Amino acid sequence: MVETARMETERPDRQSVLPYLQAVAWSFLGIRRGARARDDMSRLRPLPLVLTGLVLAAAFVGLLLAVAHFAAAGASA
């Protein structure tokens, strides 16, 4: 009796956010190279990676603006 292969229609488990945050953080610092960087690029999907980078960049700019606002408010007091 020949068994037919079933096509899996289920989507693979979604990855957690942590690997994306780590990959983006390392790339912001510019210190992840070699095999680990290639591993990240092969197993992480591009769209969530780009979105994570944009969110973290916006958060960083927001943090800088908040620090500048508080520094300027403290200087004028």
Image (cartoon, rainbow, N blue to C red):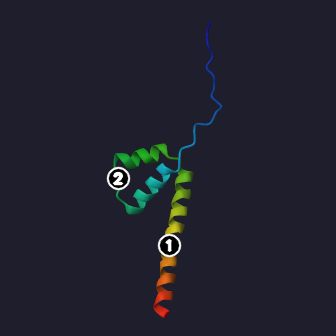
**What secondary structure is found at the residue carrying circle 1?**
helix
Q: Check the image and report above or below for 17 versus 9.
A: below
Query: Is 54 placed left or right of 27 in the picture?
Result: right
As drawn, the residue found furthest toward the front would be 77
* Image position, residue 45 (x, y; %): 53, 47
* Image position, residue 16 (x, y; %): 53, 46
* Image position, residue 49 (x, y; %): 52, 53
- Front residue of 77/72: it is 77
Residue at 62% across, 36% down: 11
Q: Residues within 10 Å of mark 1 (few under 14, many from 20)?
A: few
As drawn, the residue found furthest toward the right would be 9
Q: Check the image and report above or below for 30 versus 70.
A: above
Residue at 49% across, 52% down: 20
Q: Check the image and report above or below for 51 versus 72.
A: above
Q: Which numbered marker is on residue 9?
A: none
Quadrant of the snapshot with the N terminus:
top right
- Front residue of 77/49: it is 77
Circles 1 and 2 in contact, beta carbons < 8 Å: no
- The amino acid at mark 2 is Arg
* Image position, residue 9 (x, y; %): 65, 31
Q: Which numbered marker is on residue 63?
A: 1
Residue at 47% across, 49% down: 19
Q: Which numbered marker is on residue 33?
A: 2
- The amino acid at mark 1 is Leu
**What secondary structure is found at the residue carrying circle 2?**
loop
Q: Residues within 10 Å of mark 2 (few under 14, many from 20)?
A: few
- Badge 1 or badge 2: first in the primary sequence: 2
Residue at 56% across, 52% down: 48
Looking at the rendered image, the disc whose residue lies closer to the viewer, 1 or 2, is 1
Q: CA distance from mark 1 to mark 2?
A: 27 Å
